[in-house]
Image (cartoon, rainbow, N blue to C red):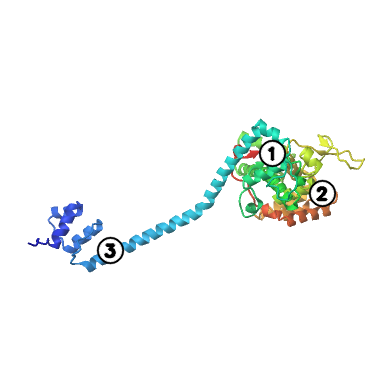
Amino acid sequence: MKSKSIPYLDQLLELGKLYKVEELKFYAKSKKKLTTSQIELILLKNKIRLPEQSYNKKKIAEIKFKEQVVTNILITLFLITFVISLISVRPFIKTVTTEIKFTYVAKEYKSNFKNEDYKKISKTELPNNKNNEDGNYIGIDTQITLNLFENLKYDLKSIRLGQSVKPVYLSKLPKDLKKIKSTNKRKDTFIKIVMPLILSENEKILEDRNKLFRILGKQSNTMGEKVWLKRRFKDYDIKGEDIAELKLRMDIVPTSIAIAQAAKESGWGTSRFALEGNAMYGQWTWSGEGIEPSKKDKKKEHKILKFPKLQSSVAAYMKNLNTHRGYSEFRDKRSKIREKKQEVNGLDLVDYLYNYAQTGSEYVKTLKIIIQQNNLNDFDTSILMNSSRSRSLTL
């Protein structure tokens, strides 16, 4: 005996009761009679599948198609938004990941350098190893530096492509740097050593410069701000509290110029003055502690100024360019570039450093050659990795 089929409308009502569709309950209480199509729409709106033997399959198919189209559009928009957001945050994620890796490796090196056994080893010298591609002897000081840069993935190619510079601050130059036979490798190593020191000093200057303009933009200043201003006038050797002159002097030295002059004055980190006294810029002194030049005019009593660490040498060099009367043209030109809202570029300013050496214009030509041959202008827009001093590596 065949079972009696349940009418389609009754099936719809049963589904409504089964899934407790509130809208159908409301209509039932109001005793409002609904058509089959209306009940179908209510069930579909509540995502309830209709019985297969629908008397209105065409209508239902249309509704399903429209709902599917809307759903697909929403999913597509979500995926597009997700991909765009992923692309936009990728550089940030990469930067954060790089900083975390750097912090980890830096901690390892700090820990190693505190180890007494490691200090004893560092006083000896290592034989040739697999890192010595040229097959030449490289002492431990240089080898530690090369290994350090390799472990930190600190390379100039990445920096030229926009990667931030690792905050690695060496206190002294490796004494055997000149034993690296490859000229390019030796130059690259020297640039990697001095660049973080230069960027760090420029960063301090820019922080002060930004603070200066914030103070000048206020109608009244606090006592602390007034004291800060007085100290800056003293730091930059300005008499009479001349604000205009402070604006001229409190500014950066382009990275390309600072590297080029360090290279020229220290023989790419191999001169006696640089190795014995951290004197990378060959600054003279008549009263301070210095190193006696082996060849000098007997009438001149100067010495080459010594520094406790490389960072001090960079700081003194920048103060010299920012305060000495011999570089007033350099500062004036830099100020005009600033007024035009342009980036401070090394090749735009190097012409005004003829007073740095007795050879004058020939010295400027040499600096230009160093900048151009080594593409040092690429580093004028470089920045330090966003790391605090506690997360940097000072050796």
Disc sitting over residue 88 in the figure = none
Among the two numbered marks 1 and 3 on one chain, the one whose residue lies closer to the N terminus: 3
Query: Could you say which is closer to the camera, residue 257 or residue 118?
Result: 118
Q: Amino acid at mark 3?
A: Lys
Q: Position of residue 19 (x, y in %)?
A: 20, 52
Residue farthest to the top?
A: 116
Disc sitting over residue 64 in the figure = 3
Q: Badge 3: how crowded within 10 Å, few (<14), some, or many (20+)?
A: few
Q: Position of residue 290 (x, y in %)?
A: 82, 36
Residue picked out by circle 1? 232
Residue picked out by circle 2? 355
Q: Residue at x 63, y 39 (%)?
A: 393
Q: Amino acid at mark 2?
A: Asn
Query: Could you say which is closer to the camera, residue 339 or residue 66?
Result: 66
Q: Is residue 25 above or below residue 100?
A: below
Q: Position of residue 366 (x, y in %)?
A: 80, 54
Q: Amino acid at mark 1?
A: Arg
Visible in this render: residue 256?
yes
Quarter placement of the N terminus: bottom left
